[in-house]
Image (cartoon, rainbow, N blue to C red):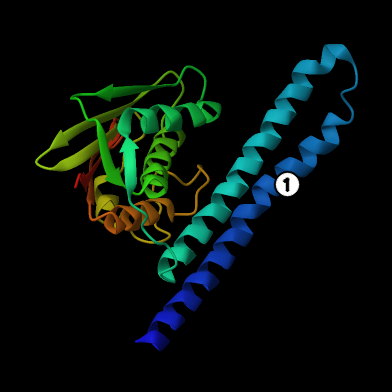
């Protein structure tokens, strides 16, 4: 059993190295070319061009960081190195803090709304894991939605469960791809031009299961996706 697990982890790492070597090339090339061009824009009237390349570098660095974080998270989960630490959490504070941290990723005209449907005071779960779940789902909604769209983070309680709904107006998931969505390295057929590792939702599902919960979704191709997360309150 241990040997099989080690072999599986080895294969996972090999696939990641192959994928990462490909995914790293584009942002690294962007950083190199933009850094070279910035040095040429020395006059005040060239500020706009300089700012454009600074933003390209920031985006590329965020992409690289995301790839590394995905692999490190999955590696820790697979090796059983993530422990659950239960503590009291105030839900509204967690949602607003996470949304605030994501503002730098928003596209032009994009907004995130927090909708709390009923009063949920303090409850107990693992803050770090729950925040990772929320952060991943919201950043995905930003990535796969266009400018001038609204992303909704709806929270409510239902039958002893805390429920999150992350609702976007993005590209949606083709019906034939939906059954594979939580598989490692899987990427839907309509996201080929958008960077990603295909690990994010697999990691989110594992995080949700660590908290004793479940995750599901509904999606219409071209119209948007809703992810529903349910986590036991007690």
Picture quadrant of residue 219:
top left
Please give left or right for residue 182 compared with residue 38 in the image.
left
Q: Nearer the viewer, residue 194 or 137?
A: 137
Picture quadrant of residue 51:
top right
Q: What percent of the width, then of the height, locates residue 138?
A: 40, 36
Picture quadrant of residue 169:
top left
Q: Nearer the viewer, residue 70 or 11?
A: 70
Q: What crowding class fits label 1: few (fewer than 14 Cα within 10 Å), some (14-19), or many (20 or more)? A: few
Q: Check disc 1 and report the residue beneath it.
A: 29
Q: Looking at the image, which residue is at 33% across and 38% down?
A: 89
Position of 76 relative to 172 (above/below) = below
Q: Nearer the viewer, residue 70 or 38?
A: 70
Q: Nearer the viewer, residue 87 or 199?
A: 87
Q: What percent of the width, then of the height, locates residue 147?
A: 46, 22
Position of 158 relative to 199 (above/below) = above
Position of 114 relative to 125 (above/below) = above
What quarter of the picture does the N terminus occupy?
bottom left
Q: Secondary structure at mark 1?
A: helix
């Amino acid at each position: 059993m241990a040997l099989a697990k080690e072999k599986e982890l080895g294969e996972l790492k090999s696939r990641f190295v192959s994928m990462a070597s490909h995914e790293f090339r584009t942002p690294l090339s962007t950083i190199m070319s933009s850094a070279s061009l910035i040095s040429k824009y020395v006059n005040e009237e060239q500020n706009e061009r300089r700012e454009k390349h600074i933003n390209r570098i920031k985006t590329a660095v965020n992409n690289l960081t995301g790839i590394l974080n995905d692999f490190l998270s999955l590696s820790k989960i697979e090796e059983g190195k993530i422990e659950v630490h239960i503590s009291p959490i105030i839900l509204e504070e967690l949602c607003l803090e996470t949304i605030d941290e994501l503002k730098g990723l928003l596209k032009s005209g994009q907004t995130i709304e927090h909708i709390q449907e009923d009063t949920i005071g303090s409850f107990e779960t693992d803050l770090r894991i729950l925040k990772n779940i929320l952060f991943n789902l919201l950043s995905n909604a930003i990535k796969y939605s266009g400018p001038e769209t609204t992303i909704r983070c709806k929270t409510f309680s239902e039958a002893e469960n805390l429920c999150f709904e992350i609702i976007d107006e993005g590209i949606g998931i083709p019906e034939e791809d939906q059954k594979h969505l939580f598989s490692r390295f899987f990427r839907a057929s309509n996201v080929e031009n958008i960077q990603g590792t295909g690990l994010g939702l697999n990691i989110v599902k594992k995080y949700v299961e660590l908290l004793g919960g479940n995750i599901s979704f509904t999606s219409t191709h071209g119209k948007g996706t809703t992810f529903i997360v349910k986590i036991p309150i007690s």
